[in-house]
Image (cartoon, helix red, strand yellow):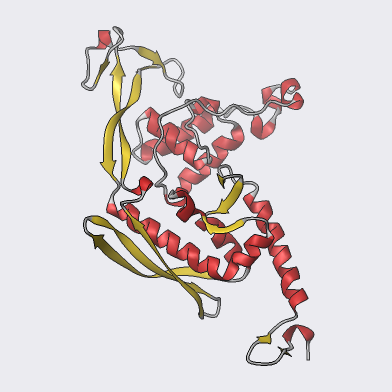
Amino acid sequence: MDEAMQVYDVGGDIQIARPPEVVIEEARRAAKVLTDVISKKPSPVIMSGEQYLEFEDWQTVARFYGITAKVKETEFLDYGGVQGFLAKAVAIRSDGMEISAAEAMCMNDEDKWSARTKYKYVYALKDGTKSDEDPPRDQIVWVDNPDKPGKKVPKKERVNAGEVSVPLFQLRSMAQTRACAKALRNVLAWVVVLAGYKPNVAEEMAGDEHAHGVAEQKPPIKQPQRKETAATKKTPPQEQGLEAPATEPQLKAINALLTKKGISDDFERHETVSKILGYTETIDSLGKLTKGEASKTIEALGKE
């Protein structure tokens, strides 16, 4: 009989189904690949110096073993005015067998799931004031349009407009995300630990949901500066390949795709592209994209 298929009887009701050294070696291989994938994440979840895996990371390691997660049930909850959802999920093996189950909740008494800041755009006027309404053209501060050379656009600023309750559909989505991640964690945490990560689910630790586009909104800030090396200092932009500035046809293609999606506001365009590229900060101009970033953006928008 093949050693890999042999059953090892150690007495009692518990048996070793496969040689432990084989199981551990496979897990180490999976952990090594997982570490390589996670190391390339643009915005990992780090708390107290420890990295926590998000739902998509648990899905990645689950695929190594032919495991997926499925939501079985979602229930609306109301505890004396505190509302939210309870989700139940299972982990399923490739042969269809359910091998793990978990429950998770997301309620609106959590700090990041009760209310969020609402923003609005206002005109910046020449006298230093701001206006919600459309002011006369001669009072508007006009600035160069970074996406359309030679054109001018009104200067607008995004300001805090108070807080709004988090929509219930977002609470439901997070409850499902947490339940699925926990179901996978139940059977794969040991592999994640071998890779050097904490076994806790990031969505429960951070209370955020990057994978579903529900991350807390932030005011616009400048694009992160890329680290300049000796090579990039000496090499002209046109010779840097994917690191060279995006071409005019690429920028036109991005603008056309964004327009097709119904996104006309400049800041919303910048925010959409920033999310595609995995930036935690919002870029202030599409003209600062590299060829590689522009190509990735076009591909993502085309798929959508």
The quadrant of the image that shows the N terminus is bottom right
Query: Which is nearer the eye, 33 or 253?
Result: 33
Q: Is residue 183 above or below residue 135?
A: below
Res. 45 in view: no
Query: Which is nearer the eye, 272 or 28?
Result: 28
Give how far across and how far down residue 281 sits, in percent.
49, 33
Query: Which is nearer the eye, 12 or 104?
Result: 12
Q: Is residue 11 above or below residue 244?
A: below
Residue at the (52%, 44%) spot, across then down: 299
Res. 184 in view: yes
Query: Which is nearer the eye, 23 or 80?
Result: 80
Residue at the (59%, 26%) spot, across then down: 225
Q: Quadrant of residue 140?
A: top left
In the image, 113: left or right of 138? Answer: right
Give how far across and how far down residue 25 sits, in percent.
76, 69
In the image, 121: left or right of 190? Answer: left
Q: Quadrant of residue 219?
A: top left
Give how far across and how far down residue 6 sits, in percent.
74, 88
- How many labels sit on residues? 0
In the image, 130: left or right of 53? Answer: left
Residue at the (31%, 8%) spot, across then down: 126
Give how far across and how far down residue 71 sits, in percent.
40, 68
